[in-house]
Amino acid sequence: MDALDQLNVLGLALAAVLVAMACVKSDRVRSWRASVNPSAPDLPDSAFVAARVLFLSLAGVGVYLAAQGFGVSDDASWSDGELTSAVRQTTDDLNGYTFQADESGTPLAFPDYASLIEDKVLQYGGGDAPGYGVAVDPAETNTPAKASFTITADGTDTAFCTRLTRTRSKKDDYTPPGITGGEGTLTYQGYRLTTSLEKGEC
């Protein structure tokens, strides 16, 4: 439970205390006042009515603010379900994903696999998930052909391991037009990804 949730729970607890105070009978309050200060003037019934209205109003405000706070907390963090759904959709989307790379093997459409996975997870997070807070950590043994990534997110202890395998796909090669508009001489090699998913860190 983060700090905001703790504050929201405290607000609900205070609201419950205020409701309990509003339910205390006036005779019991008068008896208590008389035992503490026998010479104190008696309180009119209107004072108890005003106090109950005040306590219940404050309790209502406290419940409302706590509910709003829980909503903000939910929007600012990932749940297990949100991350699970987003990672599964990401894995499905990247299975069969094609791209081209330059002579050094660097993809043309994205900077690296980790950035590609992170963008996809955020895309499939849905309206209730925040558009940030996802971490994609590459394994130390990664190569351009085979790579594994541990996916986590703020607000949940759930982790997933996505594995990518890159295979050569000649049919996805791309040759841009030449300077004069004819066929170019430079061909970017095409590749295709296959993916698998496991629960837990890589």
Image (cartoon, rainbow, N blue to C red):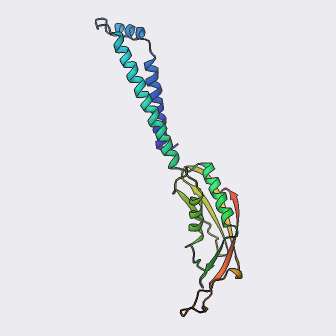
Q: Where's residue 11, x and y in %? A: 45, 33
Residue appearing at x 56%, y 67% in the figure: 115
* In-front residue for pair 168/181: 181
Residue 129's place in the image compared with 47, above or below, is below
Tell me, yes or no, if residue 34 can be seen here: yes
Residue 35's place in the image compared with 111, above or below, is above
| Furthest-front residue in this view | 181
Residue appearing at x 61%, y 53% in the figure: 83
Q: Where's residue 153, x and y in %? A: 56, 55
Q: Quadrant of the C terminus?
A: bottom right
* In-front residue for pair 68/87: 68
Q: Where's residue 196, x and y in %? A: 71, 63
Number of numbered discs visible in the structure rendering: 0
In the rendered view, does 51 fall on the left or right side of 130?
Answer: left
Tell me where residue 101 sits by quadrant.
bottom right
* In-front residue for pair 48/199: 48
Q: Where's residue 109, x and y in %? A: 57, 75
Residue appearing at x 64%, y 54% in the figure: 85
Residue appearing at x 43%, y 32% in the figure: 62
Tell me, yes or no, if residue 201 can be seen here: no
* In-front residue for pair 46/25: 46
| Furthest-top residue in this view | 38
Residue 25's place in the image compared with 192, above or below, is above
In the rendered view, does 122 fall on the left or right side of 29?
Answer: right
Residue 115's place in the image compared with 168, above or below, is above
In the rendered view, does 64 fall on the left or right side of 114?
Answer: left
